[in-house]
Image (spheres, rainbow, N blue to C red):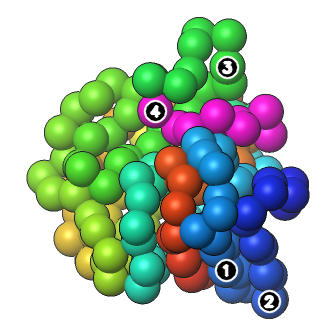
Amino acid sequence: MRFIPGAHVAVVCEAARVLFGEAFQGPATVFAEKSVSQNASFSVHMPVKASRTAIGWCSATECDKYLTPDYRSSAHPHYVSIGGAGYIYPSKNRASKGYGEGDTVRTEIDFANNLVRFWVNGDHVGETPWNGGDVAYAAISSQGNRVDCHISS
């Protein structure tokens, strides 16, 4: 993981914790150090969420911008994410519900079907095509302020 001032990352076995502190000046994205090239998923539980977030996948580690179209151009790597308000990006399609403090978001990338799926608290809330190629990096974006992300596979 790349160091971002104000963000703290702790990795323990198959679990990790990303803490964006109150002094964090976003937006920025923290991504996994290793890519996946076969179907994979991860979950993020946010006991503290005092900022906008986006959770999803990016095709390259140059995903340092926030994972929504407001901050990304066509020159940036491909990505797919879900924001707390319940929009799936970059298509801006509406998921059946969003997420907030205390919720758990799960995302799965399905390379065989070129799809990314999203769940909130165990309920499937939407999916969108994956057009980012044959590798992906798990990614979490924060707008700034305090967000505590407990990550598991």
Determine which of the numbered discs, if any, sits on residue 98 in the image: none
Q: Sort mark 2 into few (<14), some (14-19) or many (20+) by Cα contacts within 10 Å.
A: few
Q: Earlier in the sequence, mark 4 or mark 1?
A: 1
Residue at the spot 40% in from the left edge and 67% down from the top edge: 50
Q: Majority secondary structure of the magenta segment?
A: loop
> Which residue is labeled 4 in the image?
68
Foreground of the two, 108 or 73: 73
Q: CA distance from mark 4 to mark 1?
A: 22 Å
Q: CA distance from mark 1 to mark 2?
A: 8 Å
Would residue 92 be found to the left or right of residue 38 on screen? left
Q: Is residue 138 visible?
A: no
Quarter of the picture holding the N terminus: bottom right
Q: Is residue 73 shown above or below 81?
A: above
In which quarter of the view is residue 94 placed?
Answer: top left
Q: CA distance from mark 3 to mark 2?
A: 30 Å
Query: Which x, y percent locates residue 62?
Result: 79, 33
Are circles 2 and 4 on residues that touch, CB within 8 Å? no
Of marks 2 and 4, the one in the foreground: 4
Question: Of the residues shown, which amino acid type is indicated by label 3?
Answer: His
